[in-house]
Image: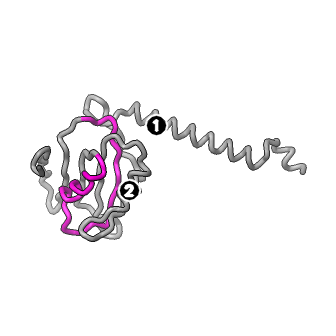
Amino acid sequence: MLGEGWKKLSYRKQVGAKWDAARSNKKDNENLSTFFFTEFDEKCKAKDVYEVFMKMGEIDEVFIPSKRDKRGRRYGFARFFNVKDERLMATKLDNMFLDGRKLFVNIPRFKRKGRTDEEGGDSAKGKRQVDLVRKQEDNNLRESRRFEMTDGRSFVEVMVV
């Protein structure tokens, strides 16, 4: 069962720099959500994390770079298919343990720039739509807060009272 669906990845030849990745063979690149994870054991491989995360949903890949964060800790990224609520999924993943150690999982602060559809990556159009929706939600929230703070009165009315 473990050998099924695994794709062999080759490493780039770099001195002292090897990354670790485990990936499914599924080709759907439309609905992918990425999660950042850290605080896992030094001996842990991407395949181990892949097997643990497989219980939480349909997973595309797990990538652990050879680099470390500024505190010298290992980190990695996991990509899941068809996640409806990224924050809820991040919370569920954050409550998992791997080899007796609690994983710390978050949504990445910085998103990768999407590749074009011809390259087989995320659609730039889809990302723009998501950004527009988020911007509209932020504007609506700001407007509702402004209205609550002034009770619907104008700036002059608020300052005169």
Q: 20 or 84, which lies in front? A: 84
Q: Residue tagged by mark 1? A: 130
Q: Earlier in the sequence, mark 2 or mark 1?
A: 2
Q: Find the magenta span and give its range.
A: 28-57
Q: Does residue 110 appear to the left or right of 161 in the view shown?
A: left
Instruction: Say if 83 sits above or below 132 in the image.
Output: below
Q: How far separated are the C-alphas under marks 2 and 1?
A: 23 Å
Q: Residue at x 17, y 58 (%)?
A: 18
Q: Residue tagged by mark 2? A: 92
Q: Amino acid at mark 1?
A: Val
Residue 1 in the image, given as x and y percentages of width and height: 11, 49
Q: Secondary structure at mark 1?
A: helix
Residue 86 in the image, given as x and y percentages of width and height: 41, 48
Q: Amino acid at mark 2?
A: Lys
Question: Of all residues shown, which one is farthest toward the right?
Answer: 160
Q: 52 or 7, which lies in front? A: 52
Q: Residue at x 21, y 55 (%)?
A: 51
Q: Residues within 10 Å of mark 1 (few under 14, many from 20)?
A: few
Question: Of all residues shown, which one is farthest toward the top?
Answer: 118
Instruction: Say if 128 sits above or below 149 in the image.
Output: above
- In magenta stretch: residue 113: no
Give the label on residue 89, or none.
none
Give residue 49's quadrant in the image: bottom left
Q: Residue at x 78, y 47 (%)?
A: 150
Residue 91 in the image, given as x and y percentages of width and height: 41, 56
- In magenta stretch: residue 54: yes
Q: Residues within 10 Å of mark 2 (few under 14, many from 20)?
A: few
Q: Residue at x 30, y 30 (%)?
A: 117
